[in-house]
Image (spheres, grey):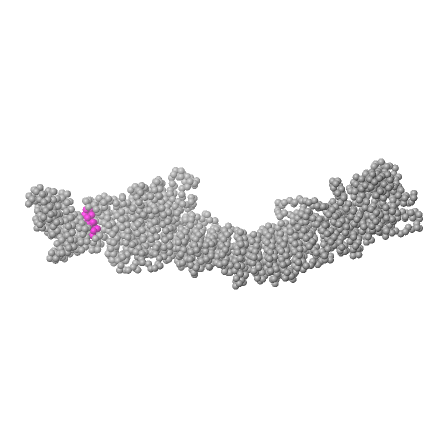
Amino acid sequence: MGCATKNAKVVAISLGSLQRLIALKAVPQSAVPLIISTMSDCINQGVDIQLRILQTLLSLITNFPAVHGQLLGDALLLCFRLQESRIAVVSSTAAATLRQLVMFVVDKVVDEDRRDELTSSEKIEAVLPNGATTKLGPSAHDAYAVFEDLCLLANSEHPRFLNLECLRKTFALELIESVLTNYHDLFRKHSELLLLLQHHLCPLVHKSLSDRPSFPLTLRCTRVVFLLLKQFSLELKTESEVFLMLLIRIIGAESSDADPADSPQGHQTRPLWMRVLAMEIMRGLCSDAELMRSVWDRYDAEEGGSKVFTSLITALKRLVTERPQLLGVCQQMFGVGVSTHPPSASTESVYGLDVGGVAGMVASAASATVSGVANMMTGEAGLSVQNSAMKLQCIDQLDKADSPPIPEAYLYLLGVQCLVSLCEGFAAFTAPLYNSIMVQKPRSAGEPVIRAPPALDLSKLPPEDAATRQLHTVHDMVESGWPALLAALSFLISTNLSDELFVDVLASYQALTTVSGMLGLTTPRDAFFTSLARMAIPTRVVSSLDSYVPAEPSTPRTAASAISESLGVSLPGTSTQPPGLSERNMACLKVLVASALFLAGSLGESWFDILEALQNADYVLTMKGARPPGSSKRNTIGPGAGSLPPSRSVSTSGSTQQLAASGSSQSPTSTQARHPLLADLDPESLQHAIQRLFDASKNLDDSAFRDFVTALCKLSAAMIGMQSEAGDSLVAENESTDELALSPGLSPPVESAHRRRVSGIHLPRTLRTGDFGISKLGGVAMLNIHRLIYRSPDIAWDPITGHLLSVIRHPHAPPTIRTQAARVLDDVLVVVPRNISTTGELQPKVQRRVLDVLAQQVIPDSAVSNSTTVEIRRMGLETLHQILQSSGHTLVVGWETIFEMLGSVCKSAPAPLPGAPPTPSPSLRQELGRNRPPPLVYLNEKGYTSLVKIAFQSLTLVCDSLSSLSPEHLRLCISTLGQFGRQADTNIALTAAESLLWGVSDSIQAKRREEDKEPEYSALWMFLLLEVLGLCTDARPEVRVGAIQTLFRTLQLYGATLSLDTWDECIWKVTFPLLDSITASIRRSSAVAPSDEVSTTATATAADAPDLQWGESKILALQSIGSIFQDFLTTKIMLLESFTRAWEVFVGHIQDSWLHDNRSITAPALRCLEKAIKSFSAAEQLKARTMEALEIAWRACDTMGGAVLEQGQSSPGTTVPGSNNTDVRPLTQESLMAYVDVIRCTRSVGRELRDSEWPLERLTRLMVILKGVLTYPSSPDFRPDVDALNPVQSVVMEAVDSIELTAPGVASLVLRDLSQYATLPFLAAFDVQAAPSPSATSSTSRPPRTAAHRVTYIALSKKAMPLLVDHFLRFKEDATIYADGTIEALFAAYSIPIKLKYDCPAPSKFGNDQPLWKTATTSFLRIIKECGPQVRKLQSDIPSDRIEGIWRQVVDTFRGGILADCSAAEHFPLDLQEAEENFDLALVASLEIDVVPYLGDPSVPDYIVSQLARVLQQGSRVRTIDDDILPPSPSSLPGSPKTSSKSKKDRFSKDSEKVEKFGDGSISMGTTATGRFMPRERFAYWCFDLLFLICSDTSKDQIPSRKRIAALSIPPLLERCRMTLVSYVADESLRGNLPFPRAREEELLYVLRKLLTLRLWPGTLWAALSDSPSTFSSEQPAIDQSLSPSELIADAVKRSTKAHLFHFYPILCEIVAIPRKTPTAWILSNAPRTATAPVETSTGAVEAASDVTNEGQAVELDARVLVKECLKEIGKELGVGR
């Protein structure tokens, strides 16, 4: 009623009340129609009323669910009518209310269905759109009717249920959308509702979309389509297909901003917003992966079905690529620091999309370098969610009547998001399944965890399983759609995306790659990998790196560059930062690596491309800016290498470059967390990631691992192939031409297919730091050592080692790579043996594999050798060394390989020349230059020495573990050591020869001790000795010495354990051949020296150094052999059957050395013989053999002595003409000494064994040889022999001393030889010619030494002279020495120094020994003392001529002593002169005591006695004048001491003539010349005294003998006196008053006094004057009484004791008659003579005459008085005055 009032206030109050009542449910159901009609009447009231009506209606319908059918329609109609109000608030409130009511209507259906209480009677029949009828519940019917009307209204048709003329289509569609959004499940249950969708809604929407587009309508239609597709695609299969295709068409159509009405066919070009709407819902659909899969299953998978999914992807691809200039170009994707001009060839095109072309479309980007990155930040072309997206997406802008402004790029952003969603959908579905099926599948016991699973094999999964079907679907979708997806993504990723979008696109890449991999789609997988690789490592970066020249502060090379540098302008073609990877490249690389890691188990052959990409990446990451300056020569290899056109732009945005290069995010200030894909994008992390991929190789199963390794090897081979092809034409600068092995047998490698892919890396060989493949292969091998060992070789071992070896042995591969391959291989080979755990059958196999591979590295395959080959071999040998060090003890096989490797290092020695000695030593070439040592047969190359050194270390190691070697291996070891012994490195050769072979010898000997092995090891030991023997004649002295020492040390050490057979072998096969070969070498090297250089002098030049060194070797060999003989002679060697022969050979060698060798060898050789001979002394039990051996030794000594004598015959310093060895070098003193020692030794051993002296004949030969040795004139090394014996003289004297003198004739032999020794200083001393210095042949030879060295024999003489006395005294009673002339020889020897006296050589240089003549005199006098009595005693046994000879010699010796030239002594000090005279007094005394008593024996001929008197007569002279016979000059003395007796007699008879006339008073012509006074007046008077004495009758013993002597001596005495007296008389008359010199006066007085006192034996003068003084000396015939008185008186007077006075009577008369005063002198009576009072009176003669003096008083004597006294005596004798 209130409402009916039409009063606004009342109506409002009424409606409010109604509303409350309804809310309180206070209104009955029956009142509902009334309320509705009432409100219908009030509907035209004011706004408030209308709003109140809407509130009441809502409350009514919701509170009375039973309102159905027409009543509900009326209520709804009210709302519809209000919704059309022009008042906005009413309209919108009505619309909202309607929405609620429609929802409520549908909601009731849900409730009704849930309760399900309806009976069929309650159901209402409805006619369906397809003409059928069905019964529906009231609520369902309501909903059906309302929804059908909405569809009809939306399509501008007449509604069936609502009494409504029309409704805004947009509103109708909104209501429909709300219903579908909230109740899609209900629709699926109610087929009638689905029919509505099918029959009404779908055609309506399709029509709307196809008609002229209107933004509000199209927007709402599109939303409805989205719901239909999303919720009902299964139920509405065909409709969905139509809608999808429609959307795809919309998306694919080119958009136009023009009003559609303007175009003749409006539906052809659709506005942008329509495409955007379509894309927005498409984005929703794409993110529903399941929906997408079902779309594929429903349409694409069906035979003949439309390819919805395929079309969709194609459309999306077309969409995103349709306006590239909008999207811009991401400069980062080209890398950093490269020129961005499009290259001539579109190298970056990927599947027809040419990024270079894209770049060309963008004018600004065409000239941009890195500035492109900077512009991108400032809102230039590009996609980003911030700049390209709408704040509210288009499809949500329901309130807009026209399309809002849409960013140009929004459409493409949507496209990107669709693609990304699709890709993520694939991955999100596949990955968990793959994980559960492949990785987490149940494992059987012992099966390893799967870490790198293979791809899914769909055929093996259960086919009825839903998951399997779905996987098939994804598989097919990817297989079908990957080209378009790849094209789209690869385009997008190179556009100017924001980081966020870039990450999304990159993630999609990753998703597609991994999904393809997981599902086993190799083609798409590889395509994605390839694309990723191109984006990760742009080819331009790789090629630009090569031409990049880092800015350097060096001197500018050209004027242009100088200007550009000074102005800061970069020249075209140069880039300001090194080429490298941008952050995005690195992100792509990261994804590439991650995907490869994920799919590692299934990549198979695709590994090659991935590894190639990684290689490039590694190159760029490591090479970036790291190249040395100046190394950028553009000698790159391959197409297009240097063809980058120069950039025309000058970059000024330095700061942005740095920003870009540093890889920071786009807004420098942003600090938000980065997406994981953009984290860790520095080169180090990426390299770690790449490394992780290689590390993962250990997780691969065997077949996958084999694929991986094969690919790696293939890549490496391809790279090396490229480079070595270049090597055929290029020789890089740092390699000399010999480095390039030019072996004709190698054809250049075939042009490889990989030139197509150049791998981007064009590297001159010079820059290669090493091959990526090889270095990674090494790492992989080390991680998979277990595979190398325990798996079949074809899985890992063969590919890896095969590849590395092929590189190592590839002659054209770059050296650095070959060495790198060698290094990698060696690392593997060292580790493998260490890791063999089992000792089973695997161990030998693996060891064999390792050593075989190593051998291929070490042993060169061709003669071509360069430094690389050498280096590689060196590395191989080092590896061998390491293997031996760490695993040598475990080696069970391969020793022969090891020795082969070690031996391969050695240069082989040439084969011995024919005719060379039979030793293994390398024969020396004959054509050697002079003075040069024989060359080693190897060039001393550095490389080889290093190889030898390293190999030798290994060999040393082998020698440390000899016990494990079998005999065959030991034999190899010995040969190898022998080879090393011949190498150029002396240290190595030495070690091999000395210590190592010694060690092997030890080892063999240790094993010999086991009985069963003895023969085998003995043979081996002999082999060893022969090998050492080969080294004994090495060209280098050190090695020879080492080898010889080793050889003999072994022999010495083990000699005692060797059998006689072995000894026999050692002697004949080792020791003698050694000597032979060394001798042969020495002879050869000396034969090489030209003859003009061989010195012909006996003191040959010092030999050339090599000769000396060979000599040293021979010395060592000889000494060692000597030691062997010494140690084993008696125990082993003498027991050999061949001993005598061996000894002969041995002695022969020594003898040969004596005759031919350098003298440095001779002495040691003899010492060696001496040692051996000494050892015989122990051989008691083998006496016969010993004696035989000694005999051989003596024979050799004899021969050698012959050589000495032959050389010694020559005068010093010249070779004997015609001697058969002109090349014999002079023997040294040392050699001679050794020689004498050998003789002594031979003698002493023989004496010990036989205890008897040698026979005289042999001793004679011995003495001859010893004398030859003593007087050997040619030694170069004489030692001083003045003060003491030199060594040779000592040993000779010792040898002489050792002779047993007792045998007949021996004493004579020795005495005679010693006598000769005593004369040597006088007869054989000589000056040694100074040997020319070794450099005498050179121009700068030293001047000869000034003081020539002299061999004097003085010490020898000093030793021999006393020794002779001793020997004589020992044998003085042996008649033989007198009978065979020995004593004469003895005296003759002494006579020489005695005669020479002061002309003897000085007795000592440094000491003050007695002069030789004094020694001789003393010794002589000692012998004389004994000689007289013995001769007298043995007279009967001594032939008379010998007695004569002895005395003759004695007298001659005295003559020499008395008449020696003493003028030299005149210069001595007086005391010394006196001492010397006193010494000589001994001669006179000895004559008086030891000679005179025996000289009168009848056996002594007269002339000898006369000679003695003549000697005394000459000795007694005080002065000489020219007419007088001068004393013999000393120079005539040595002439012939043994003049024939006849000449002596003649001479003496001539002297005696003067006395034949008794009392001749004739006076000769006088002279006033003073004459020359003799120096030793005292001595003259002593001689005079003796002469008076032997003529007087003083001595009373042996009177007949004395008388005979007196008779024979008186003539000289008288002659002597006569000379004094006559010369006085003759001179006095001439001189007048001129006084005489003192000496003459004294002489006159002395003679007168002596004559006065002399008493002869009666008849002496008579006998002297007779024809035979000896006969009449004792007894004269009676006086012939018949004579006339005067004759009678004369006869009687001659028999008087004073006959001499009568003889001088005429002269005495003359003196008395001299008118002037005669000489006078004062003397002490009876006093002994002194130097001051030289005149001595005989006992009491003068006193008796003068009677004036008493004893001891001074008396003055006067010649005249004395003469008177004499005359008185004559008178007395005549009897006057009696």
Total label count? 0
Residue 223 forms part of the magenta stretch: yes
Between 1683 and 58, the residue placed more toward the observer is: 1683
Relative placement, left or right, of 346 versus 734 is: left
Identity of the residue furthest to the bottom in this view: 1012
Identity of the residue furthest to the top in this view: 1633
Please state the horizontal and vertical placement of residue 1398, each as a whole percent of the image: 74, 45
Residue 387 forms part of the magenta stretch: no
Residue 1703 visible in the current orientation? no
Between 1568 and 935, the residue placed more toward the observer is: 1568
Between 1196 and 1605, the residue placed more toward the observer is: 1605
Residue 1512, placed above or below residue 520:
above
Residue 453, placed above or below residue 541:
below
Rendered-image quadrant of the N terminus: top left
Residue 431 visible in the current orientation? yes
Q: Which residues are magenta?
A: 211-228
Please state the horizontal and vertical placement of residue 1237, each as a whole percent of the image: 65, 54
Relative placement, left or right, of 1703 versus 1153 is: right
Q: Residue at x 86, y 37 (%)?
A: 1717
Please state the horizontal and vertical placement of residue 450, each as a whole percent of the image: 34, 56
Q: Residue at x 74, y 41 (%)?
A: 1472
Rendered-image quadrant of the C terminus: top right
Please state the horizontal and vertical placement of residue 1222, each as a whole percent of the image: 66, 53
